[in-house]
Image: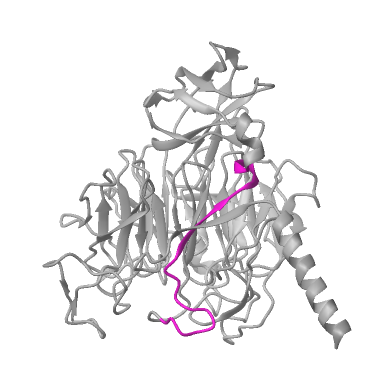
Amino acid sequence: MVSVLFIFVFTLTIAQLTHANLPGTWELLVSNAGIASMHTAVTRYNTVVLLDRTNIGPSRRMLPRGHCRNDPNDVVLKRDCYAHSVVLDLNTNEIRPLMILTDTWCSSGQFLPDGSLLHTGGDMDGLRKIRMFHPCEGDGFCDWVELKDAELVNGRWYATNQILPDGSVAIVGGRATSTIEYYPPRRNGPVLFPFLADVEDKQMDNLYPYVHLLPNGCLFIFANCKAVLYDYEANKVVRDYPPLDGGPRNYPSAGSSAMLALQGDYSTAVIVVCGGAQYGAFIERSTDTPAHGSCGRIVATAPDPVWEMEDMPFGRVMGDMVMLPTGEVLIINGAQAGTQGFEMASNPCLYPLLYRPDQPLGLRFMTLNPGTVPRMYHSTANLLPDGRVLIAGSNPHYFYKFKAEFPTELRIEAFSPEYLSLDRANIRPVIEGIPEMVRFGERFDVSVSVSLPVVGIVEVNFGSAPFATHSFSQGQRLVKLAVTSAFPDGDRSYKIQCTAPPNGMVAPPGYYMAFAVNQGVPSIARWVQLVA
């Protein structure tokens, strides 16, 4: 008995030490946000919009007096006085309720060039709705607005939005919707996009397609296990990519996807797709079918592109891929078995991974410090301006359910990558001066201060603020600017000459988090508006 106890204590101690020595730290930001966030976006005012769905019954946050929603078709609440969206002020960690009028279940979104959040579709009475959120300071009173003069032509449930070089937005697909339409609406309305119907299978697997705007102006669109290069101006598929091995990768079998940082002459775009559920897990409602552990990587702009395969340390379904300011990718959230859907996954994947794209094949993944809160179906991850990653949501139940193996999760956490560790504080740059607005191709100066002398190049990188939902960050991109060497400009101060992205194909117009990155350590970002 003593020996068994010794082995148990020894094993537990080793496990604790192993966890403690893994990179990254966790912190609790909000113990009760009132809602489980299914969709999350960070605004230029350093606030975070969190959004659930309306027909989910009572949340844990009330709307202000007199702001109830009346819906005779709601099977749970005909008069709904509960908030299903909130805004988080990152300066105070305070939560303010927001009001949405129609169902936002499994909807899509994207920031417009003026910083407004365009939000489209949903289910039931929200299927064709277009909503707008004009963000404000943390102590303001901005709220959701439903457009009365415009709506979607096709209902959009499980669609994907992508901002285009001219600042308009493509709204791609949705359940039983193999079309693409645009905001602002185009004269000819939606256009047929048969690719989505062609890749649909018996469990769908073509929902929430992965859409990436390439620097050549075309869209890389991935659904199920296939991808095409789409010229949206000509409404023409100009290339079929080879299939990605390993089974389906999109909802309801979703892994995740990211386009790696654009840099150099911006002529090369690399797409990564990681994880997913095995085909059949959704149909069979199997919670214990192991998830994929494979990743495919493809140079989407190459003359003869092929998928390069590698394996993650863990199988993962419902993971989120977050572009960090350094150009590395954080893979976080999800489960190691099952599929997307209500109560259809098990074995939460608590270990984040760092994907290091510049490392050789086989050495790109680093396992990070695990969290303690399972983040399963309907969880999100978003980069914050200070370099942390905000983690929210997880509700694998049709309604809110707190007595369950994986309960509805109202806590909001932040994960700090290793670059924010205290031993790197003396090389962390501070942006002292940067223009609030720059034009395509404009040359401008950035002033930074650093405690220790600068050695090498200080990068200046523009990171978008995507709309995160269902394991994919819509509109996510990181652009590394052309910069000169940092030259001294006073005590511990340096000046860097930068050149803004050349056009909207490389970086669509809008607000970006501008990070200075010194030896792999990012500054706190300053918001910069990029305009034509």
Q: Position of residue 19 (x, y in %)?
A: 71, 61
Q: Position of residue 321 (x, y in %)?
A: 58, 55
Q: Is residue 368 left or right of residue 238?
A: right
Residue 523 horizontal side relative to residue 49, left or right: right
- Residue 494 lies, with reference to residue 41, above or below; the image says above
Where residue 188 sits: x, y (%)?
29, 51
Q: Residue at x 64, y 59 (%)?
A: 352
Start and end of the magenta stretch? 401-421
Please identify the quadrant where the C terminus is shown: top left
The number of numbered discs placed on residues in the rendered structure image is: 0
Q: Residue at x 47, y 22 (%)?
A: 441
Q: Position of residue 70 (x, y in %)?
A: 15, 75
| Residue 139 visible in the picture | yes
Comparing 501 with 182, the one in front is 501
Q: Is residue 420 magenta?
A: yes
Q: Residue furthest right?
A: 3
* Main SS, magenta residues: loop
Q: Is residue 399 magenta?
A: no
Of 333 and 472, nearer the camera is 333
Q: Nearer the viewer, residue 529 or 302?
A: 529
Q: Tell me the quadrant of the picture where the N terminus can be found.
A: bottom right
178 left or right of 324 in image: left
